[in-house]
């Protein structure tokens, strides 16, 4: 009898400790369903937000301006040089000023080579810009899918938690010692909190792509769960010589 009471007391103590840790974990999250369900975004809206932000911090525009300036400069002739000399320094000689104007001739096609080099530089910048846009699209697709999966796991854990609570309430009516069922409920609650934390992290990673750290949004993927066909995306990228 003593061992049985000790076991029940120990089980209840473990349950209380687990509940305390759960409360601390939930308070540390700073994350509630009312906070992150303010905005609903589909994949296209998410991609547009990311592209708009990336255009603001785009460094390719500056590189294109520099390359364009070099291309214009390569088409110009070198500035002519002017030299002035004075003759007749002797006492009985008339002094004369001699002015010479010289212009460098492009005998070996230096201007043409510089123009071609500037054109190649502009082409490289365009390719790098296209590649960067494709990488951004892939990053958005991956992170968007991660958030969508975490949302589904969170919904599943919420359903499990509700079922566990119903089972626990029924067990309390049938059994005096409901500590084991309580531990089962706490275990489901821990899984729920971990899924909630993982969802919060995934949302922040996605929000970083448009320059924010807020996770107060939700993904709308009812009509289309996945943003695109990955195989078709790769084929289009190869057709455009991106990879």
Image (cartoon, helix red, strand yellow):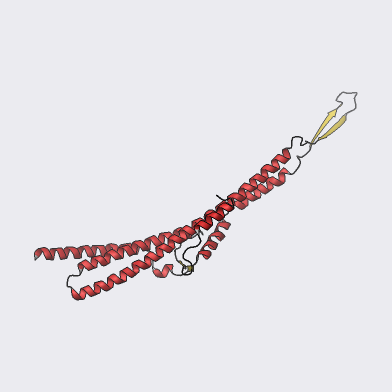
At x 17%, y 63%, the residue is 10
Q: Which quadrant holds residue 90? A: top right
At x 64%, y 50%, the residue is 64
Expressed as whole percent of the image width and height from the top left, the position of residue 47 reads: 53, 61
Above-or-below relation of 228 to 239: below
Q: Which quadrant holds residue 73? A: top right
Above-or-below relation of 78 to 62: above
Is residue 213 among what the camera can see? no
Q: Could you say which is closer to the camera, residue 23 or residue 48?
A: 48
Expressed as whole percent of the image width and height from the top left, the position of residue 3 reads: 11, 63
Above-or-below relation of 175 to 79: below
Would you say 95 lies left or right of 20 here?
Answer: right
At x 36%, y 62%, the residue is 195
| Quarter the N terminus occupies | bottom left
Expressed as whole percent of the image width and height from the top left, the position of residue 185 reads: 27, 67
At x 71%, y 47%, the residue is 72
The count of marks equals 0
Would you say 165 lies left or right of 122 here?
Answer: left
Is residue 126 among what the camera can see? yes
Q: Could you say which is closer to the camera, residue 67 or residue 213?
A: 67
């Amino acid at each position: 009898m003593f061992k049985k009471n000790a076991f029940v007391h120990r089980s209840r103590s473990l349950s209380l400790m687990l509940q305390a840790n759960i409360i601390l974990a939930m308070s540390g999250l700073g994350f509630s369903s009312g906070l992150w369900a303010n905005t609903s975004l589909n994949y296209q809206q998410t991609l547009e937000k990311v592209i708009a932000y990336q255009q603001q911090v785009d460094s390719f525009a500056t590189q294109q301006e520099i390359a364009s300036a070099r291309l214009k400069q390569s088409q110009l002739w070198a500035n002519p040089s002017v030299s002035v000399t004075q003759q007749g320094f002797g006492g009985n000689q008339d002094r004369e000023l001699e002015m010479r104007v010289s212009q460098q001739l492009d005998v070996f096609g230096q201007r043409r080579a510089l123009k071609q080099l500037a054109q190649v530089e502009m082409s490289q910048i365009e390719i790098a810009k296209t590649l960067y846009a494709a990488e951004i699209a892939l990053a958005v697709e991956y992170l968007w899918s991660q958030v969508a999966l975490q949302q589904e796991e969170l919904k599943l854990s919420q359903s499990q938690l509700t079922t566990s609570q119903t089972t626990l309430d029924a067990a309390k009516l049938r059994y005096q010692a409901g500590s084991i069922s309580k531990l089962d409920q706490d275990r489901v609650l821990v899984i729920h909190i971990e899924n909630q934390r993982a969802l919060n992290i995934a949302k922040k990673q996605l929000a970083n792509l448009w320059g924010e750290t807020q996770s107060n949004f939700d993904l709308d993927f009812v009509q289309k769960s996945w943003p695109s066909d990955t195989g078709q995306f790769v084929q289009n990228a190869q057709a455009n010589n991106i990879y």
